[in-house]
Image: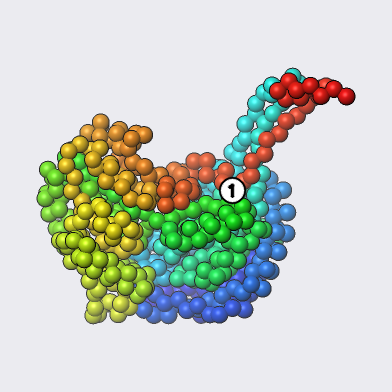
Amino acid sequence: MIQNELKILGVKDLNDGTSTGSNWFASGEIIESYSPVNGKLIGKVKTSTKEDYEKVIATAQEAFKVWRTTPAPVRGEIVRQFGDKLRKYKNDLGKLVSYEMGKSFQEGLGEVQEMIDICDFAVGQSRQLYGYTMHSERPGHRMYDQYHPYGVVGVISAFNFPVAVWSWNAALAWVCGDVVIWKPSEKTPLCSIACQNIMQEVLKENDLPEGISCLINGDYKVGEFITKDTRVPLISATGSTRMGRIVAQEVAARLGRSLLELGGNNAIIVTPDADIKMTIIGAVFGAVGTAGQRCTSTRRLIIHESIYDKVKDALVAAYNQLKIGDPLDTNNHVGPLIDKDAVEMYLNALEEVKKQGGNFIVEGGVLEGEGYESGCYVKPAIAEVENHYEIVQNETFAPILYLIKYSGEVENAIELQNGVVQGLSSAIMTNNLREAEKFLSHAGSDCGIANVNIGTSGAEIGGAFGGEKETGGGRESGSDAWKVYMRRQTNTINYTTELPLAQGIKFDL
């Protein structure tokens, strides 16, 4: 189905899953990657062993010695070239993302565009790694702070964004002078092979050493190679809250640093002053896009009682128009879940909603028959619930939308919105300035992302992406996120022949 694209991207039937740039090797077990689109085998990847990893980390450490002393704008030029390569391979890589992960082809192209955008952002950032200069309290002294490359950065990414999340971290880490070891999801290993092949071209063309861009493949045990390694000072991990807790504890135990992007339980508040048409567009895309497998997917719709029935009816009408099927067919709106394990979790969630008192106004279920042979296609569902239900409090990585009714002022809706342990993305639909400003105030949304009159789903390069509470607190891809990838140093310079001490301390000899 995508044989030509695989060939162009250098993805073989059997691929070594370990790389230091241009060198590829692996001696572990084999992962088979099956497409959720049609259940067919796409290719195989040989996983990384501890011995393979030791070769990678040793190579990365040596590369860092060269890369850290390379001027930042030169490092930015390498990232610029990577962005140009991504433009060349956009269509092919976008198709592979769609086919291996299951998101629509348009979303696959959009994900590669995010990679291109972060490269553009990082190129500019390479000339803006600024510190502050300040006057000292001591006469004849000058102080400043500066940022130095951290070293080896470990990146653990998830299946739902199999290429973008790596690039968000890698592009910034590279311009900061770090080298990167990437451990992708074992559910989407071929995407990582393709990305490394593209970066390999840039490294070769610029005669750069092995170890700047490294890849290891395998399950969570391979991820532990970097989380437990003191030679990797920073770990950036994207995935479930459960996974994040494990990573955070492992890294904290060795006093390393972690950047965590974890679960979301995102809500849109719909007030009486909302534009209903805009609301429906934002809510439906947020709930069913990527089959509900985005960390920013819309999980909850908190609707004022005065317009509840109107919004509900419009949603049901919109859901009845959804086309489910092959994501490479642009006529379809919803593709498959990633695998049958995800389908099982979806079915369990449907049962739990019913057990806990929820009422389905759009029924879910697994689709069967022609075009659905993979067993991964499910119906987007809508349920009327209460916010305190246990199933509502947890993130369900599937296209299930919860409707919650509120009464009174917007403060009551905000309380419901904030009444979950996750704190990634949030939105309010209103034309009332006071409601919008309240939502964005100190007394408003407790999420890392708060939107007005757009949905919860989708990140924009340049804005710092991340969340609070059990979402982990990390920030990627924008603003001053680059500082995470660098160590800060304060410097004091004495340009006199005297040595006065701070705070006026006297120490005469």
Q: Element type at marker 1? A: helix
Image point (15%, 58%), residue name: 316
Taking the image as drawn, is residue 458 in sight? no
Q: Relative to the observer, which residue lies in front, 359 or 334?
A: 359
Q: Is residue 129 above or below residue 159?
A: above
Tell whether 94 sits left or right of 354. right
Q: Dot 1, how many residues are within 10 Å of its Cα: few (below 14), some (14-19), or many (20+)?
A: many
Q: Is residue 46 above or below residue 505?
A: below
Q: Relative to the observer, which residue lies in front, 318 or 255?
A: 255
Image point (39%, 75%), residue name: 35
Q: Is residue 308 above or below residue 242?
A: above
In which quarter of the view is residue 33 placed?
bottom left
Q: Could you tell me residue 116's position as x and y percent? A: 48, 53
Image point (36%, 48%), residue name: 425
The residue beneath circle 1 is 485
Q: Could you tell me residue 499's position as x and y percent? A: 81, 24
Q: Residue furthest right?
A: 509
| Amino acid residing under circle 1 | Tyr
Tell whether 25 sits left or right of 33. right
Q: Could you tell me residue 249's position as x and y percent? A: 54, 57
Tell whether 164 sits left or right of 197. left
Quadrant showing the N terminus: bottom left
